[in-house]
Image: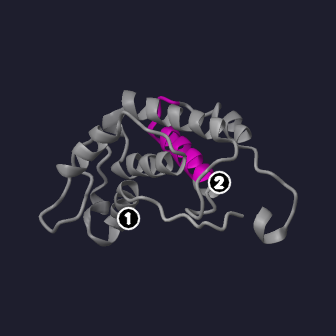
């Protein structure tokens, strides 16, 4: 928004964290919403993968720490998509997670007989998302999570 309209409005990620305080961290739906909110705040801060996140980095690291704790404590109820999204955002923020090897281990046992990753090793399995078409998002996130970003050198 700031780039497109040259408006001196700065997104404040701590406001997103304040809003997320109302989420119930014991329900699957609220956990997914919180992960989605935080990861998309980070993706937006990177200008959709254009540049590394540097502004408000402490707040984004706090978001990642909260997601990491949720994944760690409720691992089997969180989708592989959400786990990969977390790893992509961690990469955007230069955040090293102790969960990376656990998530990649899950991915390695989640490759179907056609060679793409499906959700098979947790209780968040969605039978509708087992086809190649419905697995695209998950597989792209996996590729992004293991690839070194090619950020622009022309930071906005």
**Residue 83 placed where, x, y %?**
39, 46
Q: Is residue 134 above or below residue 10?
A: below
Q: Is 138 within the magenta?
A: no
Q: Residues within 10 Å of mark 2 (few under 14, many from 20)?
A: many
The residue identified by callout 2 is 45
- Main secondary structure along the magenta-highlighted residues: helix
Q: Secondary structure at mark 1?
A: helix
Residue 155 quadrant: bottom right
Q: Quadrant of the C terminus?
A: bottom right
Q: Position of residue 85 (x, y in %)?
A: 44, 51
Q: Is residue 83 above or below residue 21?
A: below
Name the outermost residue toward the left: 113
In this picture, residue 102 sits left or right of residue 40? left
Q: Residue at x 38, y 53 (%)?
A: 81
Image location of residue 80, percent across then percent down: 34, 49
User: Which mark, by number, is residue 140?
Assistant: 1
Residue 123 visible within the image? no
- Is 39 magenta? The answer is yes
56 relative to 49, above or below: above
Q: Can residue 132 be seen here? A: yes
Q: Which residues are magenta?
A: 25-42
Q: Residue at x 61, y 66 (%)?
A: 153
- In the image, which is nearer the foreground, mark 1 or mark 2? 2
Query: In the image shown, does 121 or 98 lie closer to the viewer?
Result: 98
């Amino acid at each position: 928004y700031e780039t497109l309209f040259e408006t001196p409005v700065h997104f404040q990620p701590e406001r997103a964290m304040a809003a997320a305080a109302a989420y119930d961290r014991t329900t699957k739906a609220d956990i997914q919403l919180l992960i989605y909110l935080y990861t998309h705040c980070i993706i937006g801060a990177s200008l959709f993968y254009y540049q590394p996140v540097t502004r408000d980095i402490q707040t984004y690291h706090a978001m990642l720490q909260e997601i990491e704790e949720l994944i760690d404590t409720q691992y089997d109820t969180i989708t592989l998509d959400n786990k990969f999204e977390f790893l992509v955002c961690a990469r955007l923020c230069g955040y090293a997670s102790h969960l990376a090897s656990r998530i990649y281990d899950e991915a390695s046992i989640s490759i179907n007989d056609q060679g793409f990753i499906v959700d098979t090793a947790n209780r968040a399995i969605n039978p509708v998302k087992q086809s190649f078409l419905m697995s695209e998002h998950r597989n792209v996130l996996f590729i992004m999570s293991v690839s070194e970003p090619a950020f622009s050198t022309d930071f906005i």
